C-alpha cells in the first residue's frame, strides 16, 4: 500500500491495492481504527464538507475509504451520499493543490498526482488540450461533466465552441475534474451490504443517523411538477390516478416522495380517493406516519437501488444513469428547467375556480 493510494483512494490503482491486500469487509468492520476513521470521514462530510485529517497509518487511511462507502450505503439517505461524495472530491482537490505547492519536497513528489495522470484516470487525456489561455475540451467529453454543474456559465450555449471543442479556463478544468472525482466516489452507491456486515456496523450507522437528524440538510422543496418527476414516480403516480391497486412498497415509495416534495396529507388523500379500496382513516394514518407526525421518524423515499429491488424502477432515462435517488433526480430536474415551472396544485386550484365561474 502506497501513501498516494491513501491520499487518493478513488483511483483505480488504489482500488487494486485494496483488492490485492485481500481484506474482507468483515475484518474491516471489526478493526476499531479503520471503523473510527471511516465514521470520521462520513461525519466530517456532514459537519464541514471535508473528510477530516488523514490517519498517519497508510493502511488505516486507505481501508477507511471503502468502509466509509459501506456506512453511507447502510444509512442510505441521498443527502448524505451527495455530501459525502462532494467532501471526498473537495478533499482530493485540496490535496492535489497542496502537493502542487510542495512539489519540490521529496515527500510531495512521491504522493503527487499530476493533472495529466488525473485526466488519464478519467479517460480524458485525448479530449483535453492546453492552449495559451486555458484549455480546449472535446464537446463529447465536456457535456457529461458539465451536466451536473450549477450555473448558466456551464451551458453549452454560453461557451465558445469551435471545431468540436469547448474553450475553458484552468479554473473551469479544476471544477470539471472535481466533478469527475465526485461521480467516481458516488459510483455504485448505495452498495448492497451483507446482513453480517450491517449488524457489525449497526451502532456506527446509528450514530451517523443521529448526527444526520440533528442537521437541517434536506433541501426544502415545495414544488409539485409531475412532468419533472423521475420515471419511477411518474409511473406510480399514474397508477394512483388510474385507481390501480399498489403493493405496500410501491404505495410507500410514492407517498414518501410526495411528502418530501411538499404535498400535505390532505392533498395526498385526495389523490388516493379514486382507489376502489380507499379508506380515508387508514390513508391519513399511513401518510402521517411516513411524514413523521405520528412516528419518531420522517421517512425518505427509497433509493434507486431499493426501487430496483422491488421492481418499481421503470422507464429509466439518461438522468437515471447519473443519480442514485429519486429526490436527487427531482432536484436536478427542477434546477435544469429553462422555463418558469407551474406547481400542479396551483393548476388544480385554477381549474376549480374556472369550473365554479362557469357554473
Image (spheres, rainbow, N blue to C red):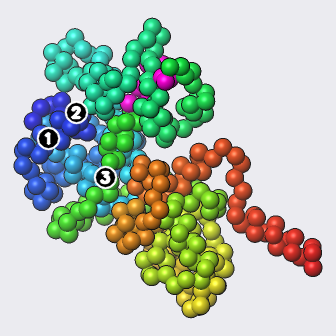
Quadrant for residue 113, please give it. Answer: top left
Q: Is residue 137 above or below residue 357?
A: above
Mark 3 vs 2, N-terminal side: 2
- The residue at 23%/36% (across/down) is 11
Q: Mark 3: which secondary structure?
A: loop
**Distance of mark 1 from mark 3, alpha carbons?**
17 Å
Quadrant of the frame with the C terminus: bottom right
Quick one: label 3, few (<14), some, or many (20+) residues within 10 Å? some
In depth, the one of 50 and 259 nearer the eye is 259
Mark carried by residue 188: 3
- The residue at 29%/46% (across/down) is 41
**Distance of mark 2 from mark 1, alpha carbons?**
15 Å
Q: Does residue 175 appear in this view?
A: no
Q: Nearer the viewer, mark 2 or mark 1?
A: 1
Mark 1 vs 3, N-terminal side: 1
From the top left corner, tell me how far across and down residue 252 is, in percent: 47, 75
Q: Is residue 305 left or right of residue 335?
A: left
Quadrant for residue 87, please give it. Answer: top left
From the top left corner, tell me how far across and down residue 330 is, in percent: 54, 55
Residue receiving disc 2: 7
Residue 169 shown in magenta: yes
Quadrant of the frame with the N terminus: top left
**Distance of mark 3 from mark 2, alpha carbons?**
21 Å
Mark carried by residue 16: 1
Amino acid at each position: 500500500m502506497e501513501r498516494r493510494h491513501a491520499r487518493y483512494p478513488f483511483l483505480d490503482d488504489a482500488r487494486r491495492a485494496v483488492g490485492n491486500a485481500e481484506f474482507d469487509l468483515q475484518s474491516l468492520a471489526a478493526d476499531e481504527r479503520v471503523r473510527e476513521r471511516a465514521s470520521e470521514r462520513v461525519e466530517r462530510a456532514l459537519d464541514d464538507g471535508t473528510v477530516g485529517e488523514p490517519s498517519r497509518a497508510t493502511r488505516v487511511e486507505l481501508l477507511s475509504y471503502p468502509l466509509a462507502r459501506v456506512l453511507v450505503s447502510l444509512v442510505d439517505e441521498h443527502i448524505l451520499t451527495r455530501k459525502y461524495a462532494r467532501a471526498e472530491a473537495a478533499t482530493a482537490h485540496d490535496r492535489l493543490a497542496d502537493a502542487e505547492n510542495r512539489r519540490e519536497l521529496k515527500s510531495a513528489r512521491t504522493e503527487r498526482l499530476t493533472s495529466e495522470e488525473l485526466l488519464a484516470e478519467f479517460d480524458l487525456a485525448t479530449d483535453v488540450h492546453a492552449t495559451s489561455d486555458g484549455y480546449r475540451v472535446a464537446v463529447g467529453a465536456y457535456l457529461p461533466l458539465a451536466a451536473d454543474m450549477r450555473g448558466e456559465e456551464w451551458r453549452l450555449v454560453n461557451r465558445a465552441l469551435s471545431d468540436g471543442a469547448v474553450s475553458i479556463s484552468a479554473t473551469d478544468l479544476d471544477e470539471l475534474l472535481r466533478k469527475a472525482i465526485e461521480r467516481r466516489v458516488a459510483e455504485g452507491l448505495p452498495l448492497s451490504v451483507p446482513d453480517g456486515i450491517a449488524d457489525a456496523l449497526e451502532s456506527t450507522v446509528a450514530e451517523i443517523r443521529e448526527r444526520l437528524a440533528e442537521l437541517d440538510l434536506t433541501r426544502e422543496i415545495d414544488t409539485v411538477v409531475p412532468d419533472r418527476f423521475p420515471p419511477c414516480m411518474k409511473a406510480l403516480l399514474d397508477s394512483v390516478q388510474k385507481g390501480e391497486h399498489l403493493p405496500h412498497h410501491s404505495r410507500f415509495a410514492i407517498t414518501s416522495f410526495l411528502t418530501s416534495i411538499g404535498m400535505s396529507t390532505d392533498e395526498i388523500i385526495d389523490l388516493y380517493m379514486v382507489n376502489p379500496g380507499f379508506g380515508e382513516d387508514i390513508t391519513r394514518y399511513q401518510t402521517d406516519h411516513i411524514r413523521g407526525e405520528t412516528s419518531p421518524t420522517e421517512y425518505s423515499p427509497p433509493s434507486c437501488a431499493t426501487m430496483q429491488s422491488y421492481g418499481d424502477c421503470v422507464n429509466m432515462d439518461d438522468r437515471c444513469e447519473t443519480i442514485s435517488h429519486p429526490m436527487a433526480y427531482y432536484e436536478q430536474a427542477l434546477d435544469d428547467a429553462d422555463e418558469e415551472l407551474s406547481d400542479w396544485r396551483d393548476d388544480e386550484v385554477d381549474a376549480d375556480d374556472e369550473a365554479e365561474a362557469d357554473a
